Amino acid sequence: MIKKINYKNIGEVMYEETLPNGFKIIYYPTKKSKNFYISISTLFGANVNKYKKNNKIIEVIPGTAHFLEHRIMDFTKNKKAMDLINGLGSMPNAYTMYDITNYNLFGSVDILKNIKLLLDCVFKAKILEKDVKKEVGIISEEIDMENDNLSYKIMSNIFKNAFVKDKSITTPILGTKESISRITSKYLIDIYNDFYTYDKMHMVVTGDFQLEEVSEYINSYFKNTKSNKKNIKVINEKEPKEVNIPYKELREDVTKTRTSILYKIPIPKIKGISPKKFDNYCNIILKCVLGSTSIVSEKIKEKNFTKFGSYAIKTKDYYMVEIHASGDNEDEFIELINQSINNIKITLKQFQSKINSMISMLILNFEDIYEVENMVTNQIKMDGKIIKNAKKDLESLTYNELKRVIKSLDFKEKTILKIKVD
Amino acid sequence: MEYKQIKKENYNINLIKTDRFKTISVVFTFVRPFKKEYIPLSSLLNTMLVKTSKKYKQSRNIVTELEKLYNMDVFSKLSILGNIFTLEYGIEFINPKFTDHEMYDKSFSMFKELIFNPNVDDNKFSSKEFQIYKNNQIMNIESVKDNSTMFAEVNYNKIMFKKLPYENTPFSLLKLFKEIDEKSLYKFYKDIIFDSKFIVTVVGDFEEELILKNINKITKYLSNKNYELSELNLNEIETNKVNEVVEQKKLNQSTLLVGYKFYNLTDFERNYVLQIYNLILGTMNNSILFVNVREKKSLCYSISSYIHKYVPSITIEAGINSNNYDKTIKEIKSCVKLMKNKDEINKLFTNALNTINLTLNDYYEDVNKIVNHYVMKEINNIVGIEEMRENYNKVTVEDIVNLNKKIELNTIYFLEGTNDKKN
């Protein structure tokens, strides 16, 4: 049954449907666009390193999720499918992250044919040994490309420095040349059968289409299917509070020193504040303390640092804030950041202004059919469901609760990485 | 989407009324014949106008004010279009019907503060902020060396587009950039903003009277100089031999750029056939280059092509292992040769036309593309999107094959990774 989701005060409507086999579909029909965008995601990414299935522990080879993505989204080996895509002029794509693998098609002609192509590609994948062997060469080139990317180098090193046992974000998404050389077609098919199950997957359809027609088609595609849920449990090692390596220096062919600081903050349990609310408060804190309205952002510019930025990432037990910049007097940068982090003060005016700005961003997400897909996929990934009252959720945040969250954050554990001029 | 042009005494306002967007965008485009010094001067000017002003010295104060205006965006952009240079300043704000009716006046007032009340004393930009942003930009420009692909492209452009506007990048003009001072930048500001040809474009579901009232408050200060703009299209690249340059850097992966020029193109070939040729050769997921160089021969992870319409040429870019240099070049040359094979083109032709149609649909969903289109319409009298679509659909397989008779290899640039030989 299709459920209607009304976004009050934004004037937008989405629809949600869960099939008897457990597969979830979210629809956003709109006449704003002449095109459509379809995606299928599985909640399987590079963060799965080990899992238990029927009392057996299975080790996942680093780079598996990404390798699988390459072998699944391969229209060039399937001439019939490729000819169909040629005829439709659609654009297929795919990506792998730590917590998700996403397959998508962008098109404007015959949405039902496009949906069938994408469903067949993801759910009827043919993984052959000869293609797996060939893929090793292509992915090795991709690994070389990423290893030349400074941001990637900083990110992968700083996560390794922060974590001791939990490998969920320290395993490189692409794997290593050594690890991918161990992957076989039989192994990939086993992983595919375990993680590409209906309960772990969802589909998003946005753009110009008829809701009833598309829903009817997807229902008939899955007509005789049943739940294929597997009894598996992903295993993550218990991570200690302390960072793995507090300080590390690397030498590279760079023009200025790149510095990265990562704070490893245990996620606190605060009475009356849900995980979703906690995320929203942390988002506001980050924007106020390190964003473009912060005092530190001006000081950093004045001290001649560039490429200043920050982001947050979460594991099961930790909330991490990474801050980076480029410039030669790196200790001064570290000191400026330490001062800001250890002395967080946010005024009521700043708090209200950030909420307005987050509401306006939420409204603008509906400008674009890609953004809508991205927003929905992120919500399912983070919260396991669509956030139906995102605007109301933001409006319910209070200044007092913000102060309680600030008090609960423990910034003691941090790791510093410097990439110095070779 | 309704289009209306208001012809003023010395300039035009393009009004594109559409309820497709929840925002209203207003863009002022200043147009001049190209001069290379405009690149460094405009880069710095854009920062000095958008990040600081007389009233708001620090950029954090500006962002705070913009947040109060429901995250209004103020943007700037410089472009080289053949022989023409354009500098764009604009605002995008949430349609006041969703927020507060006063936002029309408040948004324009903020725009006016930033662009027309710069951080200037005694006919020069304030030294403190000028030095901060100049130093920051110098560091950012120099850091191109840290990005192997961008670094390779900059070096390739200097060879492939020698003596043409496209040889210039902020990196190649760093010396000129360093020579800019507070006074020369202000002089440039007065010159380019107050003494250029300009075009105003508005996109959104706006209240016309309010928009025009606010635009008039700004344009009354501007004098629209009617520059004689030369032909947009540039001369063909002139060389008699193939340039082959190899440079080395400590990298795991090498970057290969191969440039072909086209000669004696008709307007139809330049405007329509060339785009479809590019899609088939190296842009689509199943392009000739992707299928042959990556999928069949596993010589690279990434390979694609892009074109320059105003200097008829195509560039093929690949990330490869340096050991595969000769093999990859040989394979690329074979792929270009395949473009004369009707059967090969036929396999991808419908796909290419459909992809063009899909891209043209995208035009209606992208404010930037809509603004660019109307600016180009004034500069170069280009046809409307639907007429473009009709023209693309007139292209035949024969046209692609004929275009391939006018292609000539010009440049091979290789940024060789010295680490990848160890692999």
Image (cartoon, coloured by chain):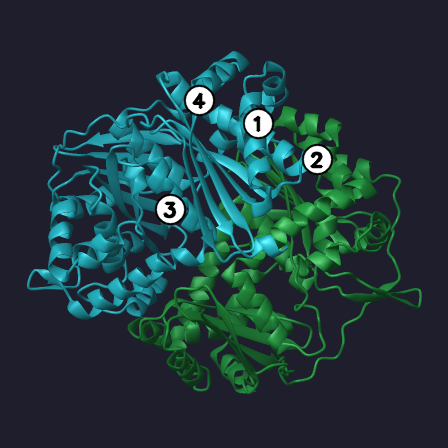
Write down the residue under mark 3.
Answer: B154
Q: Is residue A384 above or below residue A72?
A: below
Q: Amino acid at mark 3?
A: Val
Q: Is residue B411 visible?
A: yes
Q: Amino acid at mark 1?
A: Cys
Q: Nearer the viewer, residue B233 or B153?
A: B153
- Which hue belongs to chain A? green
Expressed as whole percent of the image width and height from the top left, the position of residue B206 reads 33, 42
Rendering quarter of residue B269: top left
Expressed as whole percent of the image width and height from the top left, the position of residue A233 reads 83, 66
Q: Nearer the viewer, residue A370 or B148?
A: B148
Q: Chain of mark 2?
A: A
Expressed as whole percent of the image width and height from the top left, the position of residue A417 reads 52, 75
Q: Which chain is cyan?
A: B
State if disc 3 and disc 2 touch (CB < 8 Å): no
Other residues around mark 4 within 10 Å, as few (<14) / some (14–19) / many (≥20): some
Write down the residue under mark 4.
Answer: B407
Q: Quadrant of the C terminus of chain A?
A: bottom left
The residues bearing labels 3 and 1 have C-alpha atoms spaced at a distance of 25 Å
Q: Amino acid at mark 4?
A: Ile
Q: Nearer the viewer, residue B47 or A63?
A: A63
Q: Is residue A71 above or below residue B296?
A: below
The answer to whether tags 2 and 3 share a subunit is: no
Q: Secondary structure at mark 3?
A: helix
Write down the residue under mark 2.
Answer: A75
Write down the residue under mark 1.
Answer: B335
Other residues around mark 2 within 10 Å, as few (<14) / some (14–19) / many (≥20): some
Q: Secondary structure at mark 4?
A: strand
Task: Write the residue at 30% across / 64% down.
Answer: B136
Q: Is residue A323 above or below residue B214?
A: below
